[in-house]
Amino acid sequence: MSIRPATLAELPVIVDIYNAAIPGRQATADTEAVTVESRLEWFKAHDPATRPLWVSEIEGEILGWLSLSSFYGRPAYNATAEVSLYVATTAQGLGVGRQLLQHALTAAPDLGIITLLAFIFGHNQTSIKLFERYGFTSWGLLPRVAQLDRMECDLSILGLRLGP
């Protein structure tokens, strides 16, 4: 399995992996599929030198992706990034998420990132446990801030300091 920066040509696969997560109501607050066109600006905002978007692949097949996005959009937060992680349904349970997250933790200091944040639905215990395995702890809870199919959902904020 290799991890490398995503290319624009791979955006359709990245979008497909993301869209496959929507029906499960575990990993995203989107309730309808997104389009490649609607994610183009998001893709362009991911500069490999500062806010990368990585894909994990085996023999040319993309199994998942992880992005580091700017948090809150103000200069004082430049050393903080939000982690987003999605794994193809066919690759779940194969360690793709673990490898992508470990890659991000290793690369973050060289990107000038010392704080990582993850925003995860409170009912998504699989993802919460994954992030906790890598040292993330609970930094906050936004109770019942999302509505998914008439169910009110909490949003857990997990954080990890990589630097002093």
Image (spheres, rainbow, N blue to C red):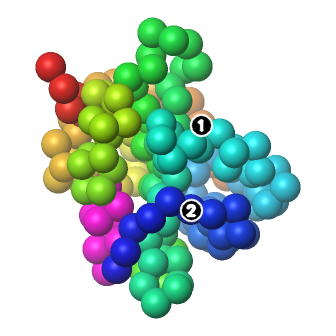
Q: In which quarter of the image is residue 145?
A: top right
Give the structural element (helix, strand or loop) at label 1: strand
Q: Is the magenta stretch mostly helix, strand or loop?
A: helix
State if disc 2 and disc 1 touch (CB < 8 Å).
Answer: no
* Residue drawn at point x = 58 percent, y = 51 percent: 28
Marks 1 and 2 sit apart, C-alpha to C-alpha, by: 30 Å
Q: Residues within 10 Å of mark 2 (few under 14, many from 20)?
A: many
Where is residue 14? Give x, y as percent.
62, 66
Which residue is label 1 attached to?
146
> Left or right: where does residue 117 sit relative to residue 132?
right
Query: Is residue 157 on the magenta stretch?
Result: no
* Boundaries of the magenta span: 92-101
Where is residue 17? Give x, y as percent.
60, 69
Which residue is label 2 attached to?
6
Residue 125 in view here: no
Where is residue 8? Give x, y as percent.
70, 62
Q: Quadrant of the C terminus?
A: top left
Residue farthest to the top, as pictured: 76
Is the residue 141 above or below the residue 101 in the image? Answer: above
* Residue drawn at point x = 37 percent, y = 74 percent: 2
Q: Nearer the viewer, residue 163 or 32?
A: 163
Residue farthest to the right, as pictured: 37
Where is residue 146? Give x, y as percent.
59, 37
Of the two numbered discs 1 and 2 on the same chain, state the one appearing first in sequence: 2
Query: Is residue 93 on the magenta stretch?
Result: yes
Q: How many labels does the image show?
A: 2
Is the residue 21 above or below the residue 29 in the image? Answer: below
> Left or right: where does residue 41 sit relative to residue 2?
right
